[in-house]
Amino acid sequence: MAEQDFSLNLEDLRPRLAEKKHLSEYFMPRRHSFILFHPDRCTGCGACEMICSMRNTEKVAPVSASVKVVRDEKEGKNFSILCQHCRKPLCLPACPTRAIEKGEDGIVRIDKLFCTECGLCTMACPAAAPIKDPGSKEIHKCDLCEGDPLCVKHCPENALTFTRGKAVRWIKGLRWTSQLISFLLLVMVFVGTFCYFRTGSISFACPTGALQNIASSGTIVLVGFSSVLPLIILTVLAGRLFCGWVCPFGFVLDLVDKITPKKIGWPSFLKSRMMKYGVFAGAVGGSYVLGFQAFCTVCPIGTICRAYGVQSFFRSAELAIIPALASLEIGERRSWCRYFCPVGAVLGLTVLLRMIKIVIGAKRCKKFSCIQCAEVCPVGIIDADKLREGLSPKIPMTECIMCMRCIDRCPYDAAKIRFRWQKVTPGEVRR
Amino acid sequence: MKNGKDKIAEAKRASGADSCVECGRCVAACPMAEMYANFSIEMSPRGIIKKTLVGDPVVEDKNIWYCTECNAGTDTCPQGVSCRDLIRKLREAAVDGKILENAKTCKCCGRAFVAIPVEDFVFARLKDEPANVFGVLDICPPCRREAYLLRNA
């Protein structure tokens, strides 16, 4: 008979309350207030330390403050380290007595009743923001002065700002509207327009389709090139805006993503973003061998554009490609666009001539404590590890579908669109 | 060797360990019981105080390296014995005697800043977090703040 374990642990004595999520938070995540630090304004005067220690221990002693001003005399840099009230705090699991809790208002507090002042929260924090008072051995950590921080009021250079981030996420509404309108137009009004369209001398063609056409027929028609130009020019000017804002199949994938929020993820040996260039080469080569547009018969974008007004049985059989590829969404968001789409491959090659780029200035954001941009990115190109280290991630624009979710979501205006030749990222000062 | 004995005598004097009445309140309050599955009387503050008073070789013992140096035992002691100070002094003696296998030294400044079992506990608690957090945890808190400044300012 196995020995029964009668020992009580912390979970039995003080059960952790289940996290409640309001229905409204699925549509609009709550914006918690926090203190943002601007390194370019700080002079290292230490007024924040002094006023904070005044609140903590009722005497001016910078060592017992919850904020720490660190100076680097060589580089001439100042920084005040304070608790960022992370979205997923590392100090919270590390505390052996579970004295640290994140409140509903987003403030991470240390409960003085349970705190044993062991200092493991300092060990776990990437910025070592909880500070041990060498005198009283207490741990001091910012609690935002319960919503009215003194350090912000007393900073002479306004290097600390108390903010809740930006309120209106208008790009989101704009993008969904654009996607819906273009879906309705391409699928219902101008049936089949995306693949090929011509009135008089004006013509428009899908670049992948046009290249397959050239390969299969073996004749180069200059008019064919001019019909490809609108999409190419749009891509050069604005990146792969088509993929994020117009593509009807991308719209379907975004809708499918809404009903499959849990992702299982693909094994890493299957994931190669170069695969889509292989599919593109295969499509063009296959067209040359077979003598017809090989990929266009199964292209999900083309199929969806030609779907309205079903004329034959074969057309409806062709439609089966859409649920088949949309089911890839259970693995990763926009799996088709990431790994396979040859239209995206052509646009990705065009983006090599790009005018604009997206930059994320890590100097302006909360870095390891936020990382919302990497979470919302549907193609997963924002390097979360770089952000955790506090460095600005480099975004590969050939993969970026310009959905601008990162720009929309970032509460600190750290994600921005810049021209390709601009070197300075947001929050940086040119010295 | 005489030097080591002096250290232990000083540790006893600084923490007031001589006045321990072995009530066991510090063991009841000690968060190590929650932290380690193999928590035992040898590891507990009472066990270490007893070992020190009896005169057993305590500096070489691994059990002094499990403590997180918190205030719980010191706060609750009716005799005012500071088990935190005792263990800190014993660790100092161990570091002076070049017994360093259980102390983690900072990669930047070389200071011994945390005990390996305590760090293992933190790592076990943070094992679901992304891996490169652990690169940050190799540095002592003041150096970490300095590194944070250099990256971000």
Image: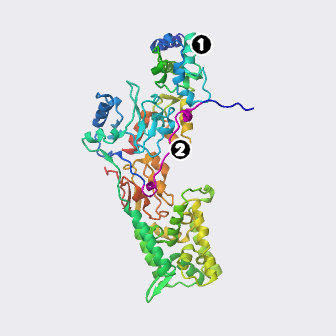
Q: Looking at numbered disc 2 in the image, what kind of residue is underneath it?
A: Glu
Give residue B3's mark. none
Reply yes or no: does residue A9 show up in magenta. yes
- Tag 2, which chain? B
Question: Of helix, strand and loop, which mostly describes the magenta segment?
Answer: loop
Q: Quadrant of residue A105?
A: top left
Badge 2 or badge 1: first in the primary sequence: 1
Q: Residues within 10 Å of mark 2 (few under 14, many from 20)?
A: few
* Mark 2 element type: loop
Give the percent coordinates (x, y) of residue B55.
57, 11
Reply yes or no: does residue A17 show up in magenta. yes
Q: Looking at numbered disc 1 in the image, what kind of residue is underneath it?
A: Asp
Residue at the left extreme, as displayed: A156
For the N terminus of chain A, the image quarter is top right
How many labels, in total?
2
C-alpha gap between disc 2 and disc 1 = 41 Å
Give the percent coordinates (x, y) of residue A251.
50, 69
What segment carries the magenta color?
Answer: A8-28
Q: Give the residue number, with chain letter if any, for mark 2.
A: B129
Residue at 53% across / 44% down in the picture? B129
Q: Quadrant of residue A330?
A: bottom right
Q: Quadrant of residue A275?
A: bottom right
- Tag 1, which chain? B
Residue at 59% across / 59% down in the picture? A271
Q: Give the residue number, with chain letter if any, for mark 1.
A: B56
From this view, report whether residue A376 is shown above or below residue A149.
below
Give the percent coordinates (x, y) of residue A321.
61, 72
Residue closest to the eye, A17 or A317: A17
